Image (cartoon, rainbow, N blue to C red):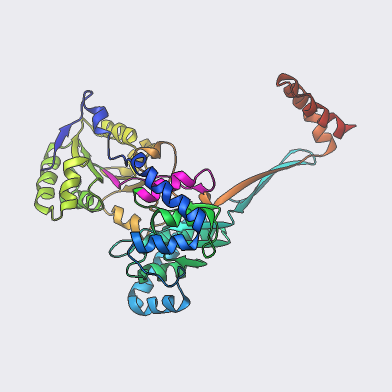
């Protein structure tokens, strides 16, 4: 059954809740895996892949031969789709790329920024029945556009082999190597390095609770992107929205995970009733049924403004505006990982081929950070070059600030330059 709830002051806080992975519960087991990989390197990886992924491997690294064979397995049509998606992603991230700049603050005195890419990045790509080539593109393309010198992919094998679509996507991105390692052991290997897998400077990519726990454990030693939970969509719709389109948008998110959140927010009782009926007629998997018994529902609000306010409080991973004048209302949105406007902008298009990365924060984290972009792979290096006259103009300010904070050698270092 799909629940229809009217938003009130009494239930407001409760309706904001969604699944929170109990990472604390798995930390002890994951810590053992991380320490084992740090201690034993490749030997631990072979053993853990055999025990946890049931893969008896001869080599951790995917060979050139396997990549060539992957192209043959998936066929020309799939290759064309992956290449076209890669080009669309490149266009988006090239536009997002921040340029270096310099300004003159005084005559002969300049300040500015240099942009430098992270040198070596590890991308984790989850396993699964079909594999996730889109995650390779969504994580690899912005890294490549940023100018990252080396990109490595770790992904769990099935029966000793990596999904061919994943391999072709990795080749299109131009990654430097793909490794047949999954789970917490993959994160540990990229964080600390082994004989086969290089130590990286940053780890990005989604994963299950064990992957997220490993990222938390290695974060003091290597930068990671962010912890992400089950997928979320919030559809804000009025009576102009086609009920079937709304229902299928919710189902598309609910099929990800039994703890996914698929929420319709609407001021229209008629739409709510029609969508509820369509959802209940189409619940064809246990995953979807569980999702709607847990964190997926229909929420009735007094008007669209109340709906926008609730959306900003919820801060969803994906926000769909199926309303009249979506371009007007989108200006009111403050918190969302990605926004889809109008009747022809499904989340699936963003999941697979549109410009932004589908690696997005969940659990309300979009209040404080964005999804993965080219900027996550860049460092901003400010620089300054003052003339003697320029330094003289600011020297009194610097000396006074140094006195305020009790740092006399700061003041003396400025005086020495001018003497």
Q: Looking at the image, how many numbered discs can be counted on the residues? A: 0
Q: Is residue 374 above or below residue 196?
A: above
Q: Residue at x 29, y 42 (%)?
A: 325
Q: Is residue 359 above or below residue 49?
A: above
- The span shown in magenta is 210-234
- Residue 324: image location, x then y, percent: 26, 43
Q: Position of residue 129 (x, y in %)?
A: 28, 64
Residue under the image location 51 percent in, 54 percent down: 39
- Is residue 261 shown to the viewer in this render? yes
In this view of the protein, can residue 156 be seen by the observer?
no
Q: Is residue 129 a member of the stretch shown in magenta?
A: no
Q: Position of residue 289 (x, y in %)?
A: 15, 48
Asked whether 255 or 181 is in front, the reply is: 181
Above or below: residue 250 compared with residue 269: below
Quadrant assignment, res 398: top right
Camera-side residue of 219 and 7: 219
> Left or right: where does residue 284 sit relative to residue 125?
left
In the image shown, does 378 or 150 lie closer to the viewer? 150
Question: Is residue 218 inside the magenta stretch?
Answer: yes
Q: Quadrant of the C terminus?
A: top right
- Residue at 20 percent across and 38 percent down: it is 266
Q: Name, please, the residue furthest toward the right.
A: 419
**Residue under the point 40% across and 46% down:** 213
Q: What x and y, as percent, mark residue 387? A: 82, 39
Q: In the rendered image, which quarter contains the N terminus?
A: top left
């Amino acid at each position: 059954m799909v629940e229809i709830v009217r938003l009130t002051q009494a239930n407001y806080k409760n309706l904001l809740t969604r699944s929170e992975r109990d990472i604390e519960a798995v930390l002890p087991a994951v810590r053992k895996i991380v320490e084992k990989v740090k201690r034993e390197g490749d030997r631990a990886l072979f053993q853990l892949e055999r025990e946890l992924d049931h893969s008896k491997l001869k080599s951790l690294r995917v060979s050139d031969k396997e990549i060539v064979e992957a192209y043959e397995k998936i066929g020309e049509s799939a290759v064309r789709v992956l290449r076209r998606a890669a080009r669309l992603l490149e266009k988006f991230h090239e536009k997002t790329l921040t340029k270096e700049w310099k300004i003159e603050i005084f005559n002969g005195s300049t300040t500015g920024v240099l942009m430098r890419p992270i040198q070596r990045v590890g991308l984790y790509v989850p396993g699964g029945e079909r594999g996730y080539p889109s995650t390779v593109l969504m994580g690899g393309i912005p890294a490549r556009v940023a100018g990252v010198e080396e990109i490595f992919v770790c992904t769990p094998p099935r029966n000793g082999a990596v999904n061919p679509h994943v391999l072709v996507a990795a080749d299109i991105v131009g990654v430097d190597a793909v490794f047949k390692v999954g789970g917490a052991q993959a994160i540990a290997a990229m964080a600390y390095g082994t004989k086969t897998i290089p130590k990286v400077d940053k780890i990005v990519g989604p994963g299950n609770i064990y992957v997220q726990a490993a990222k938390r454990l290695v974060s003091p030693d290597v930068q990671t992107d962010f912890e992400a939970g089950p997928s979320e969509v919030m559809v804000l719709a009025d009576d102009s929205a086609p009920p079937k389109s709304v229902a299928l948008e919710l189902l598309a998110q609910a099929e990800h995970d039994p703890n996914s959140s698929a929420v319709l927010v609407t001021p229209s009782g008629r739409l709510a009733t029609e969508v509820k009926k369509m959802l209940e007629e189409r619940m064809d998997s246990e995953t979807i049924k569980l999702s709607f018994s847990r964190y997926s529902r229909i929420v009735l609000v007094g008007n669209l403004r109340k709906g926008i306010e609730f959306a900003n409080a919820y801060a969803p991973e994906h926000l769909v505006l199926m309303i009249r004048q979506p371009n007007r209302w989108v200006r009111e949105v403050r918190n969302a990982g990605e926004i889809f406007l109008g009747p022809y902008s499904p989340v699936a298009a963003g999941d697979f081929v549109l410009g932004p990365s589908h690696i997005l924060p969940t659990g309300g984290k979009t209040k404080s950070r964005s999804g993965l972009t080219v900027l996550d792979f860049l460092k901003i290096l400010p620089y300054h070059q003052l003339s003697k006259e320029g330094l003289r103009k600011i020297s009194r300010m610097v000396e006074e600030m140094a006195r305020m904070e009790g740092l006399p050698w700061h003041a003396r270092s400025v005086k020495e330059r001018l003497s």
